[in-house]
Image (tube, helix red, strand yellow):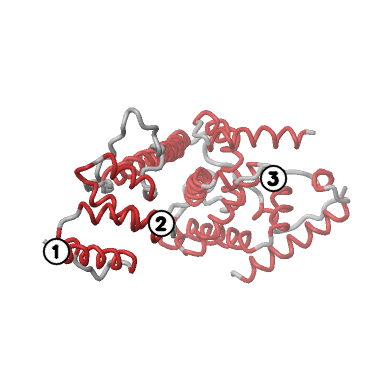
C-alpha cells in the first residue's frame, strides 16, 4: 500500500518535472538531498570533497535523465543512489583523487600532513573496495552500516530470513575485506 | 540476535557530513532548476520552430501553386458559313449537334434557299447523295442543277470527280458543243 502510494506520488512528481514544473523538482530535491549526501559520504569513506563532487554530479545527471526514472522499478532515492554509485566509480577510475588538490577533513579535525595522507589513502581504499562490490553486497552493507538497521530489520525489509541475511552480510564483509586487503 | 563483531566495521561505519545543510545546497538546487528551465524553453522553442516550419512550408506550397504556368487557350477563329434559317421553314437541325455534317437533303434545301451559294451547295448535296446515301436519282438531280448554274471552267473534268459527275459533265459539254455547232 505504502509502495503504491510512493509510486503514485513519485510518478506525479516526475511527470510534473518533465513538464517543466520547478516546484515538483524542489520537492524531490528537498526530500532526497540529505539521504543522497549521507550515502555519498559513506561511499566515499568520509572524503568530504569527493562526496561533495559526487552529490553535485549526481543531481546534475538526475535532472538531465529524469525521464528514465521509473517509479515502478524503485524509489527515487534508490535511483539517485544508482547514479551516485556510478559517479563514484567513474571518479575513482579517473584517479583524480591523487592530484593532491583535495583536502581530507575527517570529523572536522585538522591533522598533521603525514597522518592526513595516511587517512586519505585508507579512505580511498575503502571507497574503491565499496565500488567494486556487487550490488547486493553493497546494498546489505549500506542497510547495516549507513542506515543502521539490525539483521532482523534487514531481513524484514528484504523479505528474507534473518539467517539468510546474516549469511549475506558475512559474505559481503568477506568480499569487502578481500578487496580492501588486496589494495594494501 | 547475536551479530559477529568484525574488525572492518570501523571502516564501514558512516561518517556524518560536516554540516547538516551545506551552503552549496541552495546553489545546486538553483543550478539544477536552471537546467530544467532551459529544457522547458528548448521544448517550447522546438514546438515554435516546428509550427513556423509548417507555416513556411504552407507558404512555399502556395507560392509554387501560384507560380505554375496557367493554361492559355488560343482560340482560332474558323470561318463557318452561317446557316440562314427561314422563318417559315421548320428548324431541321437541333442546335446541340452543330458539328454533325449536314445531310444531302439539308444541303439541297440550303442551295434552294441561298441562290448566291447554290452552285457550291448543289455540288456538295450531289456528292453527299452519291457517296453517303447511295441515292443516284437525287445525286443526278443535284448535279444537274450544279452543272446548269456553274461557270464554264467548273465544267472541266476534275480528278476528284466521281464517275457520275464525270458522265454528266461530258454530257453537258457535248450539249454545248452541239449547240455551238448548230448556231
Q: Do the residues at pointers 3 and 1 share their chain?
A: no
Neighbourhood count class around disc 2 (C-alpha, 10 Å): few under 14, some 14–19, many 20 upward: few
Residue A53 seen from this side: yes
**Vertical relation: B75 (above or below) B166:** above
CA separation in Å, label 1 and label 2: 30 Å
Q: In the image shown, does A91 or B61 lie closer to the viewer? A: B61
Q: Chain of mark 3?
A: A
Numbered disc 2: secondary structure: helix
State the mark number for residue B182: 1
A111 relative position to A82: left or right: left
CA separation in Å, label 3 and label 1: 135 Å
Measuring from the top left, give residue A74's x and y in whole percent. Answer: 69, 45
Residue A105 seen from this side: no
A40 relative position to A60: left or right: right
- The residue identified by callout 2 is B137
Residue name at image x 36 percent, y 38 percent: B55
Q: In the image shown, does A111 or B166 lie closer to the viewer? A: B166
Quadrant in the rendering for residue A184: bottom right
Neighbourhood count class around disc 3 (C-alpha, 10 Å): few under 14, some 14–19, many 20 upward: few
Measuring from the top left, give residue B179's x and y in whole percent. Answer: 16, 62
Residue name at image x 27 percent, y 50 percent: B121
CA separation in Å, label 2 and label 3: 111 Å
Numbered disc 1: secondary structure: helix
- The residue identified by callout 3 is A74
Q: In the image shown, does B133 or B24 lie closer to the viewer? A: B133
Amino acid at each position: 500500500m505504502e509502495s503504491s502510494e510512493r509510486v503514485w506520488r513519485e510518478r506525479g512528481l516526475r511527470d510534473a518535472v518533465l513538464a517543466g514544473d520547478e516546484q515538483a523538482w524542489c520537492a524531490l530535491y528537498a526530500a532526497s538531498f540529505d539521504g543522497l549526501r549521507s550515502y555519498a559520504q559513506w561511499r566515499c569513506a568520509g572524503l568530504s570533497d569527493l562526496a561533495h563532487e559526487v552529490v553535485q554530479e549526481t543531481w546534475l545527471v538526475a535532472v538531465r535523465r529524469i525521464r528514465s526514472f521509473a517509479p515502478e522499478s524503485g524509489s527515487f532515492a534508490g535511483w539517485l543512489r544508482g547514479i551516485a554509485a556510478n559517479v563514484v566509480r567513474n571518479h575513482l577510475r579517473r584517479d583524480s583523487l591523487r592530484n593532491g588538490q583535495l583536502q581530507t577533513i575527517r570529523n572536522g579535525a585538522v591533522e598533521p600532513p603525514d597522518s592526513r595522507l595516511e587517512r586519505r589513502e585508507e579512505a580511498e581504499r575503502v571507497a574503491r573496495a565499496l565500488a567494486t562490490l556487487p550490488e547486493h553486497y553493497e546494498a546489505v552493507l549500506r542497510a547495516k552500516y549507513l542506515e543502521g538497521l539490525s539483521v532482523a530489520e534487514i531481513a524484514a525489509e528484504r523479505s528474507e530470513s534473518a539467517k539468510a541475511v546474516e549469511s549475506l552480510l558475512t559474505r559481503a564483509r568477506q568480499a569487502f575485506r578481500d578487496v580492501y586487503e588486496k589494495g594494501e | 540476535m547475536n551479530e559477529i563483531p568484525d574488525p572492518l566495521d570501523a571502516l564501514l561505519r558512516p561518517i556524518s557530513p560536516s554540516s547538516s545543510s551545506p551552503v552549496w545546497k541552495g546553489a545546486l538546487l538553483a543550478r539544477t532548476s536552471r537546467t530544467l528551465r532551459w529544457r522547458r524553453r528548448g521544448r517550447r522553442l522546438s514546438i515554435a520552430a516546428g509550427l513556423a516550419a509548417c507555416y513556411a512550408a504552407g507558404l512555399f506550397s502556395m507560392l509554387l501553386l501560384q507560380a505554375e504556368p496557367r493554361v492559355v487557350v488560343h482560340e482560332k477563329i474558323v470561318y463557318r458559313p452561317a446557316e440562314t434559317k427561314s422563318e417559315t421553314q421548320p428548324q431541321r437541325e437541333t442546335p446541340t449537334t452543330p458539328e454533325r455534317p449536314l445531310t444531302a437533303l439539308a444541303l439541297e434545301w440550303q442551295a434552294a434557299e441561298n441562290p448566291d451559294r447554290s452552285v457550291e451547295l448543289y455540288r456538295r448535296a450531289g456528292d453527299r447523295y452519291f457517296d453517303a446515301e447511295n441515292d443516284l436519282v437525287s445525286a443526278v438531280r443535284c448535279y444537274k442543277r450544279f452543272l446548269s448554274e456553274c461557270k464554264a471552267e467548273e465544267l472541266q473534268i476534275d480528278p476528284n470527280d466521281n464517275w457520275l459527275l464525270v458522265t454528266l459533265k461530258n454530257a453537258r459539254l457535248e450539249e454545248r458543243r452541239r449547240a455551238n455547232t448548230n448556231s
